[in-house]
Image: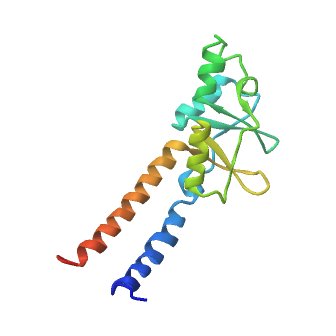
């Protein structure tokens, strides 16, 4: 079977640039905020909001007895506190958090996590290990930025490969 003369070079390019490096760059913990910013269910909503603004995050993990109990997000703040005219000082995070949130296992592929989050309209998702231990907080925004960065890098590599061949191929 005939193959183009550059076939071996292209295969090497794919194996070196497209497989190992992309997988390494698309590791969820390298994309996520790790460690995640955390609060207790007994903390006031105001305390959680202060942590969120101080750390420039849109969600905090709610931890009790070293276990993930929930997630408190900007959306929770708007729909469960502000809209209901609750006091941020008196309301406890445990009263308005999203309990038992869906989580991303650490071994989940970044593109799979992106698809999962967009289908469910999640902006944030905790990352856990096989024991359920919180490892980080994934943001769909950071995930999108990383996917675009990787795609741009791959496009640049393909462009360099094509241009290096010269006029007329």
Q: Which residue lies furthest to the front in this view?
A: 1
From where the camera sits, is residue 33 visible? no
**Residue drawn 64% across the image and 37% down it:** 60
Q: Residue furthest top?
A: 85
**Residue 142 coordinates in the image, percent (x, y):** 49, 46
Rendered view: 14 above or below 130:
below
**Residue 91 coordinates in the image, percent (x, y):** 71, 18
Rendered view: 100 above or below 137:
above
From where the camera sits, is residue 65 visible? yes
Figure disc tally: 0
Rendered view: 1 above or below 82:
below
- Residue 162 lies left or right of residue 117; in this view the side is left
**Residue drawn 62% across the image and 38% down it:** 120
Q: Quadrant of residue 82?
A: top right
Q: Which of 164 and 29 is in front in this view?
A: 164
**Residue 135 coordinates in the image, percent (x, y):** 67, 52
Q: Quadrant of residue 152?
A: bottom left
Q: In which quarter of the image is the N terminus?
A: bottom left
**Residue 117 coordinates in the image, percent (x, y):** 59, 43
Q: Which of 105 and 115 is in front in this view?
A: 115
Q: Nearer the viewer, residue 43 or 165?
A: 165
Q: In which quarter of the image is residue 8?
A: bottom left
**Residue drawn 46% across the image and 53% down it:** 146
- Residue 60 lies left or right of residue 10; in this view the side is right
């Amino acid at each position: 079977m005939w193959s183009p003369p550059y076939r071996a070079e292209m295969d090497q390019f794919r194996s070196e640039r497209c497989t190992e490096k992309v997988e390494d760059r698309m590791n969820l913990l390298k994309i996520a905020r790790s460690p995640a910013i955390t609060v207790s269910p007994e903390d006031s909503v105001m305390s959680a909001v202060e942590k969120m603004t101080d750390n420039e995050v849109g969600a905090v993990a709610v931890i009790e007895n070293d276990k993930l109990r929930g997630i408190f997000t900007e959306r929770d703040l708007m729909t469960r506190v502000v809209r209901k005219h609750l006091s941020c000082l008196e309301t406890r995070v445990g009263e308005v958090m999203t309990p038992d949130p869906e989580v991303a296992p650490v071994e989940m592929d970044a593109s799979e996590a992106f698809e999962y989050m967009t289908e469910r309209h999640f902006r944030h998702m905790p990352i856990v290990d096989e024991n359920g231990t919180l490892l980080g907080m994934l943001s769909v925004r950071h995930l999108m930025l990383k996917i675009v960065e990787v795609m741009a890098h791959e496009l640049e590599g393909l462009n360099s490969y094509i241009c290096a061949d010269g006029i007329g191929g």
